[in-house]
Amino acid sequence: MYDIKGYYDAETVSEATALLADNPNLKIIAGGTDMLIKMHGGQLEDVELLSLRKIKSLEKISIADNGTIVIGAMATFSMIFHNPILKDAAPILTEAAISMGGPQIRNIATIGGNVCNGATSADSASSLFALNAQLKLESKAGERVVPIREFYLGPGKVALNPGEILTEILIAPEDYKGFGGHYIKFAMREAMDIATLGVAVLCKVESVTFNEVRIGLGVAGPTPLRCLEAEEYAKGKEISSETLAEIGKLAVKSTKARTSWRASKEYREHLVEELTQRALKTAVVSAGGAEVV
Amino acid sequence: MAYTVVGKSVRRVDAVAKVTGRAKYTDDFSERNMLVGKILHSPYAHAIVKSIDVSKAKALPGVEAVLTYKDLPDIRFATAIPGIIEAMATDEVGVAELKYSTAGHPYALEETHRDKEDRNILTQKARFVGDNIAAVVATDDLIASKALKLIEVEYEVLEPLTSTDAALKEGAPLIHDDCEGNIISSKGYEMGNIEEALKESDHVIEGEYETSIVQHCHLENQVSHAYVDSDRRIVIMTSTQIPHIVRRIVAQSLGISWGRVRVIKPYIGGGFGNKQDVCIEPLNAAMSLAVGGRPVRLELSREEAMIDTRTRHAFKFKIKTGINNDGKINGIYISAVSNTGAYASHGHSIASSGGGKFRYLYPTKALKYEPLTVYTNLPVAGAMRGYGTPQIFFAFESHIEDIAKKLNLDPIEIRKKNVVKEGHVDPLSKNTIRSCSIRECIDKGRELIKWDAKKALYKEQTGDIRRGVGMACFSYASGTYPVALELAGARIVMNQDGSVQLQLGATEIGQGSDTVFAQMVSEVLGIPMYMVHVISTQDTDITPFDTGSYASRQTYVSGMAVEKAALEVKKKVLTVASSMTDIPAHLLDLKEQSVVFKDSGEKVIELEVVAMQSYYDRVNAQPITSDVSNNARINAIPFGVTFAEVEVDMKTGKIKILEIYNVHDSGKIINPLLAEGQVHGGVSMAIGYALSEQLLFDEKTGKPLNNNLLDYKLPTIMDTPDIGAAFVEKEDPTGPFGVKSLGEPPIVSPAPAIRNAVLDATDVAFNRIPMNPQRVFEKFKEQGLI
Ligand SMILES: Cc1cc2nc3c(=O)[nH]c(=O)nc-3n(C[C@H](O)[C@H](O)[C@H](O)COP(=O)(O)OP(=O)(O)OC[C@H]3O[C@@H](n4cnc5c(N)ncnc54)[C@H](O)[C@@H]3O)c2cc1C
C-alpha cells in the first residue's frame, strides 16, 4: 500500500506545466521506478502525484534537420536500446540502456526519470556527460536549456526549478559525429544492480593519434563527472598502451571516490584507472583506430 | 528394480496450478474485515526499554490495538471475548516470563534435549536491530505504519556485541542473563586420540577458514493471518514448512493448551529452512486476541524479513590435520565458533549437525570437533539449507586442497584415498554406510568438466584473465536420525473409481515432494499419476502428524510412510479382490488399474470393480483407506561432488564461473527432472554464497547495511552459469525405492569447489567467503598481484 494522497494525469506538456504551476506540492512521476521505491521506504509521504505517462509526445526519439538528436524525456530504456538512430549515432547510450535494471524495469523506467532522480549511479548519466547532452526544461513561464554538467548539483539534487519539467534531451551533431565510444557498467551483478562504476568514453582518432577523448564517469563522485585533465592530456597523443595508462592515471585525479561498505576508495580508484583504459581500447577500434595491445 | 512411474520425469502435480496462477498462497486468502498488524522494531542492537508510551498511537483513528511486552503475558485476559477468557483461563496460566524456543524441531520428552527457550513474543530488552518491541493492529497498512511512528520509546542503550570475538571477551555484557559468557553450548565430540594421531603423522597442517552471514531470500516473505473461530480456537494460516510444530510453539508462546491452535499451510513460495522456524505466528495470534479474535494479517516486508526472521550462521574454523606422505589422513582437529545472533533458534544444533554430517566423508583414526555457539547482537541465525554443512565443508574442502598443494599431492587422489567405503559404521551415530558411490561421482565429474585436459592447459598462466578448475566433496544425511525423532504420517483414501487421495503431513515447499509421493503411490497401486490426488494443503486438524519439511527428510522419511500407506491399501484391495474371485491374495498384484496375476500379469478384475465393491457391498462394505505413521529409526548417507571451472579477472577481481557440475549419489532418483531442478537451485544458492552474498552490519552499532535485494547481492539468472547435474544411481537398501536425500545436498560443495578453482587459476588461497571483487582486489593487492 502506497501513501498517495492525490493523483493527476496530464496529456500534454502545457497541461502538465499548468497543473504544476497551480499546485506546487505536486511531484512528477514518470515510470515510477524511483518514486515508488521512495514511497515504499517512507522517504515520501502523503504525496500528490502528477503523471506524465499520457504525454505521448515525450516518448519520441528523433533527429532534427540540423542533426541534433532529440530524446523525449519519457522514452523508456527499452525504447532507447531499440532505437535505430541512437544505435547508430550514440551507441554508448544504447549500451548504457541495456545494462540498466532488468527487462521489466527497462520497459517502464524513463531516461528523464533517470536524469531527474539525480543519482551518480544513473546508467544514462556517464554517457550523457560524455555526449555533452543538453536538457530542455519547460514550465508555464517558458523553457530553458541547461547543459547536463550544470544540472547535477549533488546526490539526488538537480537544477530543476519548481514548476519545471524535463521534456527533451538534446545531443548536438558535433558531440556525436565521428566519435567511437564504449560504455562499461561495472557492477556486482550482471543485471538488476547499480553500478560500482560507470565508464563512458568517446574518442576521435586521426590515424595513430587521439584527436579528442571524452571520459564520463558515474559513481566516481557525488555526481556524474568528466575527467577533464585526462581528456586534455589525450589530445594529439599517440594511441599506445602507455598513453592509455597515463590517461587512466589522470582520470583518477578528477574523481572524488570515497570508502563505503559497498567498495573502498582505493578499489574504486583502481577501477577508474583500469576500466577507463579498457573502455578506451574498445572505443579506439570503433572509432576506426588500430587495436591497442 | 524395474519401475513404471518411479524413476520417470513425470510432470509436477502442481505444475498447472502454479503456472496458471491458480495455486493459492497465504496472501491469496482473505477473511472478511481483516485487520493489518505491524511490528515496531528496535533501532538498537542492545538496549532496554525504559519507558514506552502508546497513547498517541492508540488515539489514531483506525488503530484497533497496540501491544507491548507489558500486555503480552496477560493477553488472554485482556481480550474482550467472553468465550475465550473462560476457555483459556482453564488452561495452565502463563507467567510474565513466558519464554519459548522457536526452532522447528520435534518436541523432545527429555527436557535436556529441548531447544533453548529464550524468546518472548515482544521484548523489553532489544537484542538486535529489528527486535520486536511493540506491535499495532489497524484497519489498513498505512494507518498501522503511521501508528508505529507515534509510539514513543525511551531506550537505555547497552554495548552492542556485533561479533563473536566481542561476545566472548572477558567481562562482556550478557545478552541473555542466564547465559554465562554468551555461550549457548560447546558440546562437540572426540573419536580416537587426536594428540597421538597428529604425533604419528608425517605432517601436521593447519588452516583457518571463515564463512559469512547470508539469508535465504525465499520468494515469498513470511506472511500469515490469524483469528479466533466459533469454537474459540486460534486459527492461523501461514507460510510454513512445519505446520504441526507451529501449532505447538504458538500454544507454548501463549501458555495455552496445544489443541486450542489450528494451523493451515497452503502453497508456499519457498522456505530453505527459514520457515522451519516459528517467526511471526505467535505475535500474529496475540494480535488477533488483542482485537477480540478478529482476523489480522501479518506480513513482513523484504527489508524486515531479511533481518527479523533467520539467517545462516557465520562460522570461524581452525583446523589441524595429521597426514602421512602417502596422503592418508590420520587425524583431524576442528574448532569452530558459530555466531547464532540474538536468540538461540536452532542454536547449537547447526554446529552439531554440520560436524555430524561431516564425519561420514573421511573416517579417520582420530577426529576431534570443538564447536562453540555464541550469542551476539545480530539477527537470529537458524536453519538454512545445508544446516551447518556448507560452513564445515567449505572449511575442510578448502583445507584438504591446501594440504594437497603443500604436499604436492593430486587433489582428487588425496580425496579418493580418504573417502569412506561401504560398510563403514559411524562410531557415534551408529549409522551404517550401506551404499556409497562417491568414487564413481568423482570419476564422472572429472570426465564432465574435462579435468585432466584443463589442468594441463591452465598450468602456467600470467595474463590478466586466468582460468582454473577445482573440486570438492561432501557427505550428508537423510533426515536427523538418531539425533531427533523421524516420524512421518500418510493417509490414503480410495475412491469408487480406484483413484485415491493422498494426504500427508510432509509439506510441499516447492521442492516437488508432492509429486514424488504421488509417483510412489502410483507405482505401488498400479494406477496412473492422474488418479493420485495429493492434498497439498496441510491443516493440523485433519492432516496426519509429521514434523514437516526439513533435513532433506521428505522423500526418504515421509516416503517410507507413503510407501507403507500405499502397501496397506494394496493389501486391502487384493483382499477384497480375493474375496470376489476366490484367488488367494498372495497370487495377486496391481497393474494398469487392474488386479492381475502376479507371475503372468494376466488380468483378473478391474480395480474400479473392486473399489465399488468396497463401497457398496451389502454385507462387507468398507471403503479402502489407510492411515499410517512411520518412525524411521534409520538413516542413509548421500554423497556428492562439485567440479567447477572459473575465470578470474586479475585486474578487477571479478570471478566468473565458466562451467560447474554437481554429481550426486542420492540413491535411486525418483524423478530425474525434479532432481535436476533441485541441483540447479542448490548450486545457484551456493554460487551466491561463494561469490557475492553477505549480510553486512555496522560494526559499531549492529545496524544492518544491506537488508534489501538491491544491496544484498543475490545472483540473478544472468549471473548463473549453465549448471550440470548428474547422478550415480545406486539404490540404498533402507530407503523407499532405494532413495537417499537430495534436498539440501546440492548446496554443500560448490563454494569450496569454486574457491579451489580460484586457487588453481591464481595461486591465491581465499579462506573467507564471499570472494567478492572488493575482497579479491584486497587480497591480490596484499600478494603483490595488483
Ligand atoms: C529494480 C530496479 C532496478 C533498477 N536498476 C537501475 C539501473 O540498473 N541503473 C539505473 O540507472 N537505475 C536503475 N534503477 C533506478 C530507476 O529505474 C531509474 O533511475 C529510472 O530511470 C527512473 O525513471 P522513472 O521513469 O521510473 O522515474 P520516476 O521514478 O518516475 O521519477 C524519478 C524522479 O525524477 C522525477 N522526474 C521524472 N520524470 C521527470 C521529468 N520529465 N521532469 C522532471 N522530473 C521528472 C520524479 O519526480 C522523481 O523525482 C532501478 C530501479 C529499480 C526499481
Image (cartoon, coloured by chain):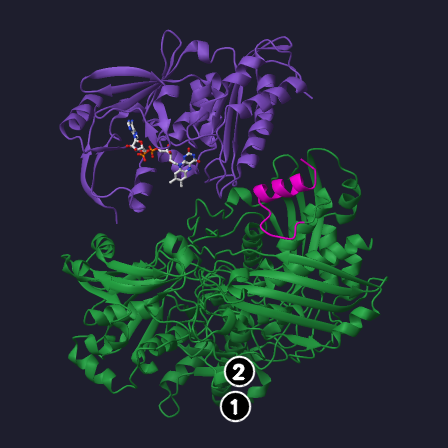
Chain colours: A purple, B green
Whether B232 is drawn above or below B336: the answer is below
Whether A253 is drawn above or below B364: the answer is above
Evaluate whether residue B591 shows in this view. Answer: no
Give the residue pinned by disc 2. B631
Crowdedness of circle 1 by 10 Å Cα count: few (<14), some, many (20+)? few
Give the residue pinned by disc 1. B582
Is residue A150 rendered to the left or right of residue A204? left
Nearest the viewer among B689 and A263 is A263
Nearest the viewer among B435 and B588 is B435
Which of the two discs, 2 and 1, labels the residue nearer the N terminus?
A: 1
Q: Nearer the viewer, mark 2 or mark 1?
A: 2
Is residue B770 rendered to the left or right of residue A22? right
Nearest the viewer among B596 and B498 is B498
Residue drawn where x is 24% and y is 29% of the image: A54
Crowdedness of circle 2 by 10 Å Cα count: few (<14), some, many (20+)? some
Q: Residue B769: say if magenta.
A: yes
Q: Residue B202: say if magenta.
A: no
Quadrant position of residue A158: top left
Instruction: Give how far across and how far down residue B543 sits, in percent.
Output: 39, 76
Instruction: Give how far across and how far down residue B708 sits, in percent.
Output: 41, 49
Quadrant position of residue B80: bottom left
Q: Secondary structure at mark 1?
A: loop
Q: Secondary structure at mark 2?
A: strand
Figure disc tally: 2
- The answer to whether the residues at label 2 and label 1 have Cβ atoms under 8 Å apart is no
**What is the three-letter code of the residue carrying label 1?**
Asp
Q: CA distance from mark 2 to mark 1?
A: 35 Å
Evaluate whether residue B109 shows in this view. Answer: yes
| Highlighted magenta segment, given as a residue range | B766-786
Nearest the viewer among B1 and B78 is B78
- Specify the quadrant that holds the C terminus of chain A: top right
Host chain of mark 2: B
